[in-house]
Image (cartoon, helix red, strand yellow):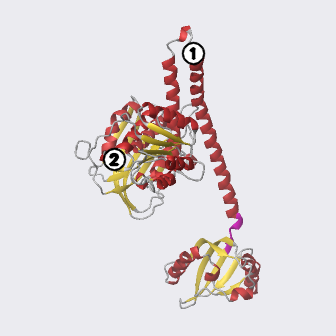
Amino acid sequence: MDVFRAAFETAAHGMALVSLDGAWLEVNNAICDLLGYSRVELSGLTFQDVTHPDDLESDLELLRSTLLGERQSYQLEKRYIRKDGAVVWILLSVALIRDEGGLPQFFVSQILDLTERRRAEEQLRHAQKMEAVGQLTGGIAHDFNNLLTVVIGNLEMLERGPSVADGEASPRRVGAALEAARRGARLTGRLLAFARKQPLDPKPVDVNDLATGLGPLLARTVGEGVDLRYDLQAGLWHTVADPVQLENALLNLVINARDATQGRGAVLGLRTRNRRVYRPSSEPAERGVPPGEYVVATVSDNGTGMSAEVVRRASEPFFTTKGAGRGTGLGLSMVAGFVEQSGGHLTIQSATGRGTEVRIYLPRCSAQVARDDDPTLVAPAPAAGRGVGERILLVEDDRSIRTMSAEFLRGLGYEVIEAQDGRDALACQRRSSEPFDLLLTDVSMPGGINGRELGDQMRMREPDIPILLCSGHAEASLIERSSLPRSCGFLAKPYSLSELATGVHQALSSSNRKNEQ
């Protein structure tokens, strides 16, 4: 017995005997050092007294199941609160000791201090995060520098004026600069998708109809020599998602699958299924998917597959195994961002040499999908028209954007009053002898008043004024269109002049003032 006592006292990790109700019966020096209590102090406490409140219930549940004979022992990571208030992470191993008759007597606990390990893991996570940030910023800089080179070069040649030999090139140069700018806008949209902050327009979707409609485009995309097979379940449930973004997601997955097959003999699959998940699963194809009812869209290939490390990093921005110039590495991260933002889940199942299967889980929706061929359910989109002197208060802190937008809108026949921030806009409203027909405002502005707050304050004097909010940040409060105030639209930056004209026309058309005139 002296040998066991010596081992108990001198063990490098904590050891204790604990009563059935949780009181400390015996503790060794390591536990006292870990918790900052003396043996006498601990003898008047229970393990419940020093367990972090958020971890107590899981510990007690395991203890109860052990007492009921459902298990002989258990192990879990949990937190203790030291005498000085500091929190320490520990690995707790508990075994129940019974007497000769099988009756429970006490628990033997072994406690391993995880503080240093946790600190090292946090440092590693931070290092990985900084590596990802570096990779992200480097990729953005590379792609945007390429786009800006095209824009700057073509605009500089236009600035010099046409030469005798190059007099017909102006439209081509303008077109090249515009295309580069549009590519920059698409890149920004993909970054916002990765960041889970893109503005979405969710609506009921029949994924089978969407996939069928994509068929011709997918066939052209994968090219000859690739066998694209559809397996669409009849009676598929509906889901709620942004159909344009869902199309982009499926297109990205099919392109990735095609690239992974590296040539002829490739077989790609696009499958849809209804799926009920009853309990969390550790299977790769369903790992991390909580219980619920889902519409599942699966894209598979018979390509080279991915190692476990590549699968782990596949959704990181700008991470790609493709050669230089063959991909930005934003495709899968954009898909993952869109799916998560839509309340769904994305899983990847792959192995080297065995192909890849990517599943998109989207929550089931019971609402019926409005069919395109039902004229009672499809409202025509209003076309952008010209103004007839409507007064627009344009609030934009970027002078270049403000000047360009004001000049364009005046050319359409609107009266435009410019303001550089929220305070300036409120001053304009106070000075104005006539009401405004529209507030067109950026969301993020200096001066302490953002676009939504400005709209609220202006409506105190003009309750019916329609509002058109603009933003390139897609703040969380604007992601869901349903969260916007009444008579309030949203225009995502960067916007084209035609999109600006359409947005203004729709905002004015929806206002009560316009309808009452």
Q: Label 2: which residue?
A: 207
Callout 1: helix, strand or loop?
loop
Instruction: Residue at 69% x, 88% y: name it.
Output: 43
Distance between the alpha carbons at the discs numbered 2 and 1: 51 Å
Q: Amino acid at mark 1?
A: Gly
Q: Is residue 511 above or below residue 151?
A: below
**In the rendered view, does 515 fall on the left or right side of 84?**
left
Q: Residue 323 location, x and y as percent?
A: 57, 33
Is the residue marked by circle 2 packed among few (<14), some (14-19), or many (20+) residues within 10 Å? many
Q: Residue 177 location, x and y as percent?
A: 53, 26
Q: Is residue 143 above or below residue 112?
A: above
Could you say which quadrant of the image residue 101 lies in? bottom right
Residue furthest to the front: 433
Q: Label 1: which residue?
A: 161
Part of the protein shown in magenta: 111-116
The answer to whether residue 304 is visible is: no
Instruction: Residue at 48% x, 33% y: name it.
Output: 262
Q: Earlier in the sequence, mark 2 or mark 1?
A: 1
Q: Is residue 57 magenta?
A: no
Q: Residue 116 location, x and y as percent?
A: 72, 65
Instruction: Residue at 38% x, 42% y: name it.
Output: 269
Could you say which quadrant of the image residue 153 lies in? top right
Could you say which quadrant of the image residue 105 lies in? bottom right
**In the rendered view, does 116 fall on the left or right side of 279?**
right
Q: Residue 172 location, x and y as percent?
A: 49, 19
Is the residue marked by circle 1 packed among few (<14), some (14-19), or many (20+) residues within 10 Å? few
Q: Amino acid at mark 2?
A: Val
